[in-house]
Structures are given as C-alpha cells and as structure tokens.
Image: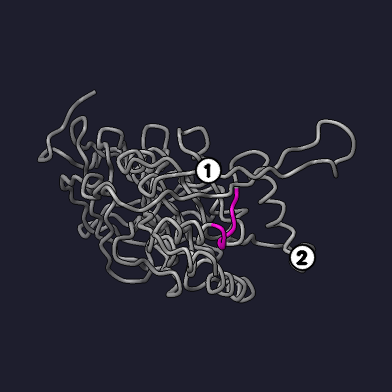
Amino acid sequence: MTEWTLAECHVLYDRCEGINGGILTRSAEGWDVTTIEQLGGYSALLPLHLGTPGTSMRVNVEIDMQAGCIGLALVDDYLTLLHERRTTHYGLARLGLEAFDATRVRGLLVRNMSVFPGPSRARLRAITFEAAPILWQIEPPAATTAGPVCLPLRRYTESTHGAETNGTWHMDVRHFAVRDVVLVVMDAWATHDSAGWMQRAEANMRQNLAPLLQAVRTAGIRVIHASHDRTPHPLVAPAEGDIVLDGAVSTQSFVDLLEHLGTRLIVYTGYSSNMCVMTRPIGLLHMQNRGFELALVRDASLAMETPDTLAGEWMHAAMVNFVELNLAATVTAREMSAAAYAAAGMPAKAAE
C-alpha cells in the first residue's frame, strides 16, 4: 500500500463518481452532489489517500447545503462508515471528520440523510486535511479515592423445561472501580418528528435520566454523549468533563477510545431501545464480544412503540427481555444512582 505524507493527502479527482444513481459533477466552485431519494442511500464516493500508519487525521469539508440533508462519512475499502457527520442547516458549514488510523480511510462517502421523500443537494466547496492526535487528547480517568460502584445487575434465564412462565431473573451484585465505568447517553435529542414520542422521552429524561447523570457525575463516572449531530435535550445536556462524540463513529474507533480510558463496563442509556441504543455502531449489538461488560439502564430508555404496543410500552419490555437474555445485564436508574452516591461517600443521598 502506498504511504502518503500529510502534504500529499488528496482527493483522487479522476476517480470520483456518483453511485447508485446519485449525480456528482465538478465545477469551478467544487463538487455538486444530487443524492438518490432513498434515506441513507449511498450516492457519491470521493476516493482519498491519507496519512501513514498510526497517524490520526482530521478531514475538513466545507459544504454548501441547498436541499434536504446530507451525510458525509469516511469509509474503508468495504464502505464501512468510520466517522460520519450530517448537515444540520442550509447554507455554508464546515464539518470535521476524524480518523484515529488514517491508513484505513479509502474515501469520502456522500449519502442522503433526509427523512422527507426526495433527493438532497449540496456543493462540496473544499476538502482539507490536518494531522490531529484526536484520541489522545482525552485524558484517562485519574486515580480516585471513591469507593467501588456496587451494581445489582439483572439477567434473565429462559426455562429449559416446562412452561415459558418458568423463566427466572437473576441478580448479581458486581463491584467496579469508578474509573472502570462509562455511561453512554445515546441520542437524547431536543426535538423529534413525533410529538407523542417527544413527550414520553422528555418525561423519561426528567424522571430518570437527568437524576442519574447527576449521580454518576458526583461519583466521577465518565459520561459519553452520542447525539449524532443532533442537538441534545437541555435536561441531559453535556456537562464539563463529559465526552461528546461528534457525528457517528465506527465500532473500532469507539473500542479504541474505551481501551484508552481503561473501561471495563459500558452502561447504556438513551433512545430508543429498539433502534439507536441497539443498532448504532457504538450500540449494544455491535459492542458485544468486544471485551467489555455491558449493561442497560432499563428505565432510562424507551422504545419506539406501535399502535398495538404503546399503551403498555410492550415493545420496550420486549427489548429489555431481549437484552437480558442475549446481550447484557440491566439495572434501574435508581439502583445505579444509589450505587454512584455510595461510591462518592454520600450514603444518605444513596438511600433516598
């Protein structure tokens, strides 16, 4: 494989193309892109050569958004998304895409991210590159005098004989050092297209997620926000010391970050349990078997329900069961808050 110095990083203009029916044309002002109509549909590819082994790189894209919504992603040889950003408004914007290992990057992928029918349009005005030790700018947690975080983690065991009602829950109290735990807040957005969903999500944030964040920060547990270029809700907005992931990062990049932090346990919160919490590249499905213990705060999350399941929130109940049976343990917000306050030496607060 050819190695390129920073000065030699460039777009291979003669190989840029629209794909799957997307249109990509070059003008004096940049690249004009018209995507296909399909939401998430791959529409154009600009091949890139970046860096040398071990180099972290930032790719800056100046984009003039004209219609719809576009996602820009660094991809590897198999079009796996390594880091993706999405446009949030019309007009000029500058999006930064980060690669922890620049040698994995093979191109800049353009895809349609509009939730409304029809193609999206934009002009890519400029693409620039800079070396950036991105991962190492986040300091690992320092040694702390806080006590252990003692979590009652619940799993479900299906009955091997007799009726389905013979299945049982098992509680296992586990002890973790504060520095070994991270709490992920997944897609806790300020707005949503569904007013009914937004009302339920706000109530859940106010009653469960926001108090939980206060507790874990008191103990010194690291909080990671993944809002995927959407505005986080003010009730659960990032605080000083929290880590904020811009856009969508790849599973491997997230693993690299967690290993750098010395993480043992990833605790998931956020929305929704049957979509983003489960299926994002940093979500439960992709992080299983990656060397970490996983847990879901089962009442600091909700599912997107159907007309048949909304009254009892049965879709979320099914996802909690799926997690406990196949992927991870669960815990309640109250249980984790109590464990965090106890670790911080605040037993009275833990007992509330």
- Give the numbered dot on residue 108: none
User: Horizontal placement of 342 versus 170: left or right?
Assistant: left
Q: Position of residue 297 (x, y in %)?
A: 56, 55
Q: Residue sitting at 39 percent across and 37 percent down?
A: 252
- Name the residue rendered at 22%, 52% in the picture: 127
Direction top: furthest residue: 1
> Helix, strand, or loop for circle 2?
loop
Magenta-drawn segment: 330-335
Label located before the other in sequence (1 or 2): 1
> Farthest residue in the left direction?
7
What amino acid type should be assigned to the residue bearing mark 1?
A: Arg
- Residue 20 falls left or right of residue 173: left
On the rendered image, what quadrant is the N terminus found in?
top left
Q: Is residue 201 above or below residue 79?
A: below
User: Which residue was labeled with disc 2?
Assistant: 312
Q: Using the image as rendered, state which of residue 251 and residue 225 is in the foreground.
A: 225
**Magenta segment includes 220:** no
Instruction: Depth check: give the residue in front, 175 or 107.
Output: 175
Q: Tell me how many marks there are.
A: 2
